[in-house]
Amino acid sequence: MNQKQRDELASGWGDSVQWDVDMADYSTLRAGGMADALVDVQNLDELRNLLCRLEELQVSCRVIGRGSNVLVSEQGYRGVIIRLQGELNSVTRLDEENKSGNPVVIKAGAGCSMSLLVSWCTGHGLTGLEFMVGIPGSVGGAVWMNGGAWGHEIGERLQAIEFVDYSGHLLVVPVSELKLLYRKLDLKEGDLEKRIISSATFALSPGREEQIRVRCEQYLGRRRGKQPTGAASAGSFFKNPPGDSAGRLIEAAGLKGTSCGQAMVSTVHANFIINTGRATAADIVALMQQVQDVVFQEFGVRLEPEVEIL
Protein backbone atom coordinates (compact mmCIF):
# COMPACT_ATOMS: atom_id res chain seq x y z
CA MET A 1 0.00 0.00 0.00
CA ASN A 2 1.22 3.50 -0.78
CA GLN A 3 0.89 6.39 1.67
CA LYS A 4 -2.19 7.81 -0.03
CA GLN A 5 -3.99 4.47 0.25
CA ARG A 6 -2.98 4.22 3.91
CA ASP A 7 -4.27 7.72 4.64
CA GLU A 8 -7.58 7.03 2.90
CA LEU A 9 -8.06 3.77 4.79
CA ALA A 10 -7.14 5.39 8.10
CA SER A 11 -9.63 8.20 7.56
CA GLY A 12 -12.51 5.76 7.27
CA TRP A 13 -11.49 3.01 9.70
CA GLY A 14 -9.24 4.71 12.23
CA ASP A 15 -8.56 2.59 15.30
CA SER A 16 -9.92 -0.54 13.60
CA VAL A 17 -6.74 -0.75 11.53
CA GLN A 18 -3.51 -2.32 12.76
CA TRP A 19 -0.55 -1.29 10.62
CA ASP A 20 2.51 -3.32 9.61
CA VAL A 21 1.40 -6.53 11.33
CA ASP A 22 3.62 -9.53 12.04
CA MET A 23 1.44 -12.35 10.69
CA ALA A 24 3.30 -14.95 12.76
CA ASP A 25 1.01 -13.83 15.57
CA TYR A 26 -2.04 -14.82 13.51
CA SER A 27 -0.88 -18.17 12.13
CA THR A 28 -1.13 -21.58 13.77
CA LEU A 29 2.34 -22.24 12.32
CA ARG A 30 3.59 -19.29 14.39
CA ALA A 31 5.48 -18.01 11.36
CA GLY A 32 4.91 -15.51 8.60
CA GLY A 33 5.95 -12.23 7.09
CA MET A 34 4.48 -8.77 7.60
CA ALA A 35 1.15 -7.51 6.26
CA ASP A 36 0.58 -3.85 5.46
CA ALA A 37 -2.56 -3.79 7.58
CA LEU A 38 -5.06 -5.92 9.47
CA VAL A 39 -8.70 -4.99 10.07
CA ASP A 40 -11.24 -6.74 12.30
CA VAL A 41 -14.84 -6.42 11.10
CA GLN A 42 -17.70 -7.05 13.53
CA ASN A 43 -20.71 -7.56 11.26
CA LEU A 44 -21.86 -7.99 7.68
CA ASP A 45 -22.33 -4.27 7.02
CA GLU A 46 -18.78 -3.52 8.14
CA LEU A 47 -17.47 -6.26 5.87
CA ARG A 48 -19.43 -4.99 2.88
CA ASN A 49 -18.32 -1.38 3.46
CA LEU A 50 -14.68 -2.34 3.90
CA LEU A 51 -14.59 -4.46 0.75
CA CYS A 52 -16.16 -1.61 -1.25
CA ARG A 53 -13.63 0.86 0.11
CA LEU A 54 -10.68 -1.39 -0.65
CA GLU A 55 -11.98 -1.97 -4.16
CA GLU A 56 -12.21 1.80 -4.69
CA LEU A 57 -8.67 2.27 -3.38
CA GLN A 58 -7.41 -0.66 -5.48
CA VAL A 59 -5.98 -2.32 -2.39
CA SER A 60 -5.63 -6.11 -2.28
CA CYS A 61 -7.22 -7.97 0.60
CA ARG A 62 -7.45 -11.45 2.03
CA VAL A 63 -9.78 -12.82 4.68
CA ILE A 64 -8.24 -15.21 7.16
CA GLY A 65 -10.04 -17.26 9.76
CA ARG A 66 -7.96 -18.88 12.48
CA GLY A 67 -4.78 -18.74 10.41
CA SER A 68 -4.53 -22.51 10.07
CA ASN A 69 -4.41 -22.80 6.28
CA VAL A 70 -2.49 -19.70 5.32
CA LEU A 71 1.14 -18.60 5.50
CA VAL A 72 2.32 -15.10 4.64
CA SER A 73 5.63 -15.37 2.83
CA GLU A 74 8.84 -13.74 4.00
CA GLN A 75 8.24 -11.00 1.39
CA GLY A 76 5.09 -9.99 3.22
CA TYR A 77 1.57 -9.21 2.06
CA ARG A 78 1.02 -5.90 0.30
CA GLY A 79 -2.57 -5.24 1.25
CA VAL A 80 -5.13 -5.69 4.02
CA ILE A 81 -5.74 -8.87 6.00
CA ILE A 82 -9.36 -9.07 7.21
CA ARG A 83 -10.55 -11.05 10.23
CA LEU A 84 -14.23 -11.80 10.81
CA GLN A 85 -15.32 -11.11 14.38
CA GLY A 86 -18.50 -10.31 16.35
CA GLU A 87 -21.67 -11.37 14.53
CA LEU A 88 -19.53 -13.11 11.91
CA ASN A 89 -18.17 -15.35 14.66
CA SER A 90 -21.50 -16.63 15.97
CA VAL A 91 -23.86 -19.62 15.56
CA THR A 92 -27.66 -19.44 15.49
CA ARG A 93 -30.51 -21.87 14.93
CA LEU A 94 -32.85 -20.82 12.11
CA ASP A 95 -35.84 -23.13 12.66
CA GLU A 96 -36.86 -23.01 16.31
CA GLU A 97 -40.23 -24.58 15.43
CA ASN A 98 -38.67 -27.56 13.69
CA LYS A 99 -40.86 -30.65 13.73
CA SER A 100 -39.46 -33.84 15.21
CA GLY A 101 -37.47 -35.91 12.74
CA ASN A 102 -36.76 -33.11 10.27
CA PRO A 103 -33.25 -31.73 9.76
CA VAL A 104 -32.35 -28.79 11.98
CA VAL A 105 -30.93 -25.78 10.12
CA ILE A 106 -28.24 -23.67 11.74
CA LYS A 107 -26.27 -20.67 10.50
CA ALA A 108 -22.61 -20.13 11.36
CA GLY A 109 -20.57 -17.03 10.64
CA ALA A 110 -17.50 -17.62 8.49
CA GLY A 111 -15.28 -16.36 11.31
CA CYS A 112 -16.59 -18.93 13.78
CA SER A 113 -13.97 -21.49 14.79
CA MET A 114 -14.70 -25.11 13.99
CA SER A 115 -14.16 -25.97 17.65
CA LEU A 116 -16.85 -23.48 18.67
CA LEU A 117 -19.27 -24.78 16.03
CA VAL A 118 -18.82 -28.43 17.06
CA SER A 119 -19.13 -27.49 20.74
CA TRP A 120 -22.30 -25.46 20.06
CA CYS A 121 -23.85 -28.33 18.11
CA THR A 122 -22.98 -30.79 20.86
CA GLY A 123 -24.51 -28.59 23.56
CA HIS A 124 -27.69 -28.22 21.53
CA GLY A 125 -28.00 -31.94 20.81
CA LEU A 126 -27.32 -31.67 17.07
CA THR A 127 -25.37 -34.38 15.30
CA GLY A 128 -23.60 -34.51 11.94
CA LEU A 129 -20.38 -32.55 12.35
CA GLU A 130 -18.58 -34.59 15.00
CA PHE A 131 -15.93 -35.67 12.47
CA MET A 132 -14.75 -32.03 12.29
CA VAL A 133 -13.78 -31.97 15.97
CA GLY A 134 -10.13 -31.10 16.48
CA ILE A 135 -9.72 -29.55 13.02
CA PRO A 136 -8.14 -26.11 13.36
CA GLY A 137 -9.52 -23.14 11.50
CA SER A 138 -12.79 -21.37 10.84
CA VAL A 139 -16.12 -22.26 9.27
CA GLY A 140 -15.32 -20.10 6.23
CA GLY A 141 -12.00 -21.82 5.67
CA ALA A 142 -13.45 -25.29 6.20
CA VAL A 143 -16.25 -24.62 3.71
CA TRP A 144 -13.92 -22.99 1.17
CA MET A 145 -11.67 -26.06 1.29
CA ASN A 146 -14.55 -28.53 1.73
CA GLY A 147 -12.57 -29.71 4.73
CA GLY A 148 -13.10 -33.05 6.37
CA ALA A 149 -11.67 -36.09 8.09
CA TRP A 150 -12.28 -39.78 8.67
CA GLY A 151 -14.00 -40.24 5.31
CA HIS A 152 -16.41 -37.31 5.70
CA GLU A 153 -16.49 -33.76 4.32
CA ILE A 154 -18.23 -30.67 5.65
CA GLY A 155 -20.08 -30.37 2.33
CA GLU A 156 -22.19 -33.38 3.34
CA ARG A 157 -24.05 -31.16 5.82
CA LEU A 158 -23.88 -27.91 3.90
CA GLN A 159 -27.19 -26.32 2.88
CA ALA A 160 -26.18 -22.91 1.50
CA ILE A 161 -23.39 -20.34 1.53
CA GLU A 162 -23.65 -16.56 1.80
CA PHE A 163 -20.99 -14.69 -0.18
CA VAL A 164 -20.02 -11.03 -0.34
CA ASP A 165 -18.26 -9.73 -3.44
CA TYR A 166 -15.76 -6.88 -3.55
CA SER A 167 -18.52 -4.44 -4.47
CA GLY A 168 -20.41 -5.31 -1.28
CA HIS A 169 -23.16 -7.32 -2.98
CA LEU A 170 -24.63 -10.35 -1.20
CA LEU A 171 -25.18 -13.69 -2.90
CA VAL A 172 -26.74 -16.76 -1.28
CA VAL A 173 -25.91 -19.97 -3.13
CA PRO A 174 -27.72 -23.23 -2.29
CA VAL A 175 -25.68 -26.42 -2.18
CA SER A 176 -27.41 -27.60 -5.37
CA GLU A 177 -25.51 -24.89 -7.26
CA LEU A 178 -22.12 -25.76 -5.77
CA LYS A 179 -19.41 -28.17 -6.85
CA LEU A 180 -18.01 -29.79 -3.72
CA LEU A 181 -14.70 -31.34 -4.69
CA TYR A 182 -11.83 -32.77 -2.67
CA ARG A 183 -10.44 -29.84 -0.67
CA LYS A 184 -12.02 -27.41 -3.08
CA LEU A 185 -15.25 -25.49 -3.49
CA ASP A 186 -16.55 -24.14 -6.79
CA LEU A 187 -19.75 -23.10 -8.52
CA LYS A 188 -21.48 -25.26 -11.12
CA GLU A 189 -21.80 -22.09 -13.18
CA GLY A 190 -19.44 -19.13 -12.84
CA ASP A 191 -16.49 -18.84 -10.48
CA LEU A 192 -15.71 -17.65 -6.98
CA GLU A 193 -13.17 -15.00 -7.93
CA LYS A 194 -13.44 -11.94 -5.67
CA ARG A 195 -16.10 -13.49 -3.46
CA ILE A 196 -15.76 -13.97 0.27
CA ILE A 197 -17.77 -16.36 2.44
CA SER A 198 -19.59 -14.48 5.20
CA SER A 199 -21.69 -17.36 6.58
CA ALA A 200 -22.91 -20.88 5.88
CA THR A 201 -26.02 -22.86 6.80
CA PHE A 202 -25.98 -26.54 7.71
CA ALA A 203 -28.68 -29.20 7.99
CA LEU A 204 -28.11 -31.35 11.08
CA SER A 205 -30.01 -34.08 12.88
CA PRO A 206 -31.37 -34.09 16.44
CA GLY A 207 -29.41 -36.36 18.73
CA ARG A 208 -28.58 -37.08 22.34
CA GLU A 209 -25.91 -34.81 23.78
CA GLU A 210 -24.21 -37.64 25.68
CA GLN A 211 -23.83 -39.77 22.55
CA ILE A 212 -22.55 -36.83 20.52
CA ARG A 213 -19.92 -36.09 23.17
CA VAL A 214 -18.78 -39.71 23.12
CA ARG A 215 -18.34 -39.62 19.34
CA CYS A 216 -16.36 -36.36 19.60
CA GLU A 217 -14.09 -37.90 22.22
CA GLN A 218 -13.56 -40.94 20.03
CA TYR A 219 -12.51 -38.77 17.08
CA LEU A 220 -10.23 -36.70 19.32
CA GLY A 221 -8.69 -39.87 20.70
CA ARG A 222 -7.89 -41.06 17.19
CA ARG A 223 -6.28 -37.70 16.43
CA ARG A 224 -4.16 -37.72 19.56
CA GLY A 225 -2.85 -41.15 18.69
CA LYS A 226 -1.87 -40.34 15.12
CA GLN A 227 -1.07 -36.62 14.96
CA PRO A 228 1.52 -34.40 16.67
CA THR A 229 0.30 -32.40 19.65
CA GLY A 230 1.84 -29.43 21.40
CA ALA A 231 3.71 -28.15 18.33
CA ALA A 232 2.74 -25.29 16.04
CA SER A 233 1.42 -26.62 12.74
CA ALA A 234 -1.21 -26.04 10.06
CA GLY A 235 -2.74 -29.47 10.40
CA SER A 236 -2.37 -31.62 7.27
CA PHE A 237 -0.01 -29.68 5.04
CA PHE A 238 -0.54 -31.44 1.70
CA LYS A 239 -3.65 -32.66 -0.07
CA ASN A 240 -3.92 -36.40 -0.54
CA PRO A 241 -3.31 -37.38 -4.19
CA PRO A 242 -6.00 -39.55 -5.82
CA GLY A 243 -5.97 -43.06 -4.42
CA ASP A 244 -3.13 -42.46 -2.00
CA SER A 245 -2.17 -40.43 1.07
CA ALA A 246 0.36 -37.63 1.26
CA GLY A 247 1.56 -38.87 4.64
CA ARG A 248 2.29 -42.34 3.31
CA LEU A 249 4.28 -40.99 0.35
CA ILE A 250 6.30 -38.60 2.50
CA GLU A 251 7.10 -41.32 5.03
CA ALA A 252 7.98 -43.82 2.29
CA ALA A 253 10.39 -41.23 0.86
CA GLY A 254 12.22 -41.25 4.20
CA LEU A 255 11.39 -37.65 5.01
CA LYS A 256 10.08 -37.96 8.56
CA GLY A 257 12.21 -35.75 10.79
CA THR A 258 13.68 -33.80 7.85
CA SER A 259 14.34 -30.19 8.86
CA CYS A 260 14.95 -26.83 7.27
CA GLY A 261 15.93 -24.26 9.86
CA GLN A 262 13.47 -24.88 12.67
CA ALA A 263 10.73 -26.28 10.44
CA MET A 264 10.47 -30.07 10.52
CA VAL A 265 8.46 -32.89 9.00
CA SER A 266 6.77 -34.42 12.03
CA THR A 267 8.09 -37.77 13.23
CA VAL A 268 4.54 -38.62 14.38
CA HIS A 269 2.67 -37.92 11.12
CA ALA A 270 4.59 -37.19 7.93
CA ASN A 271 1.91 -34.88 6.50
CA PHE A 272 2.50 -32.36 9.28
CA ILE A 273 5.15 -29.65 9.03
CA ILE A 274 5.78 -28.33 12.51
CA ASN A 275 7.52 -25.27 13.89
CA THR A 276 9.97 -26.59 16.46
CA GLY A 277 10.89 -23.15 17.76
CA ARG A 278 11.42 -20.07 15.67
CA ALA A 279 10.92 -21.31 12.13
CA THR A 280 10.47 -18.59 9.53
CA ALA A 281 8.06 -18.61 6.63
CA ALA A 282 11.11 -19.13 4.40
CA ASP A 283 12.06 -22.26 6.40
CA ILE A 284 8.57 -23.70 5.97
CA VAL A 285 8.36 -22.91 2.25
CA ALA A 286 11.83 -24.38 1.64
CA LEU A 287 10.89 -27.58 3.51
CA MET A 288 7.60 -27.78 1.60
CA GLN A 289 9.46 -27.56 -1.71
CA GLN A 290 12.02 -30.15 -0.60
CA VAL A 291 9.23 -32.59 0.30
CA GLN A 292 7.51 -31.96 -3.04
CA ASP A 293 10.74 -32.51 -4.99
CA VAL A 294 11.76 -35.71 -3.20
CA VAL A 295 8.30 -37.28 -3.39
CA PHE A 296 8.12 -36.40 -7.10
CA GLN A 297 11.55 -37.93 -7.74
CA GLU A 298 10.64 -41.10 -5.83
CA PHE A 299 7.04 -41.64 -6.94
CA GLY A 300 6.29 -39.24 -9.80
CA VAL A 301 3.61 -37.49 -7.70
CA ARG A 302 3.64 -33.72 -7.22
CA LEU A 303 2.06 -33.01 -3.83
CA GLU A 304 -0.20 -29.97 -3.67
CA PRO A 305 -0.24 -27.98 -0.43
CA GLU A 306 -3.47 -27.36 1.44
CA VAL A 307 -1.81 -24.33 3.00
CA GLU A 308 -2.06 -21.20 0.88
CA ILE A 309 1.14 -19.17 0.61
CA LEU A 310 0.46 -15.44 0.34
Image: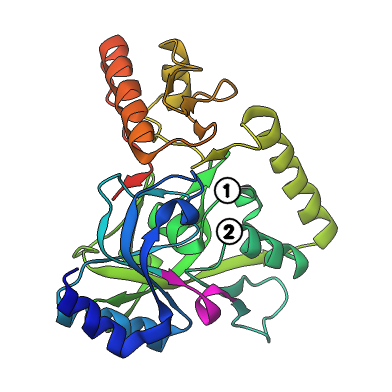
Q: Position of residue 200 (x, y in %)?
A: 47, 70
Q: Is residue 81 magenta?
A: no
User: Residue 196 lies in what quarter of the image?
Assistant: bottom left
What is the quadrant of residue 229 in the picture?
top right
Residue located at (70% from left, 62% from top): 119
To which residue does mark 2 refer? Answer: 114
Look at 56% across and 68% down and name the residue there.
203
Per the rendering, the mark at residue 49 is none
- Residue placed most toward the observer, 139 or 67: 67
Residue 89 counted in the magenta span: yes
Q: Secondary structure at mark 1?
A: loop
Tell me if residue 296 comes above or below residue 289 in the rendering: above
Would residue 201 appear left or right of 129 to someone viewing this image?
A: left
Q: Spatial distance from mark 2 to mark 1, Cα to Cα?
A: 7 Å
Three-letter code, disc 1 = Ile
Tell me, what colour scheme is on the image?
rainbow
Query: Mark 2 is on which residue type?
Result: Met
Question: Dot 2: few (<14), some (14–19), or many (≥20) neighbours within 10 Å?
Answer: many
Query: Measured from the top left, where is residue 112 in percent x and y?
Result: 55, 67
Frontmost residue, 222 versus 52: 52
Residue located at (66% from left, 52% from top): 130
Res. 21 in view: yes
The mark that comes first in sequence, 2 or 1, is 2
- Residue 310, position in %: x, y? 28, 50
Which element type, helix, strand or loop, lies under badge 2? helix
**Which residues make up the magenta segment?**
83-90
Query: Between residues 229 and 192, which one lies in front from this camera angle?
Result: 229
| Residue identified by numbered label 1 | 135
Residue 67 in picture, x, y percent from top left: 46, 54
Question: Compared with residue 204, is residue 282 higher up or lower down, i.e. above or below?
Answer: above
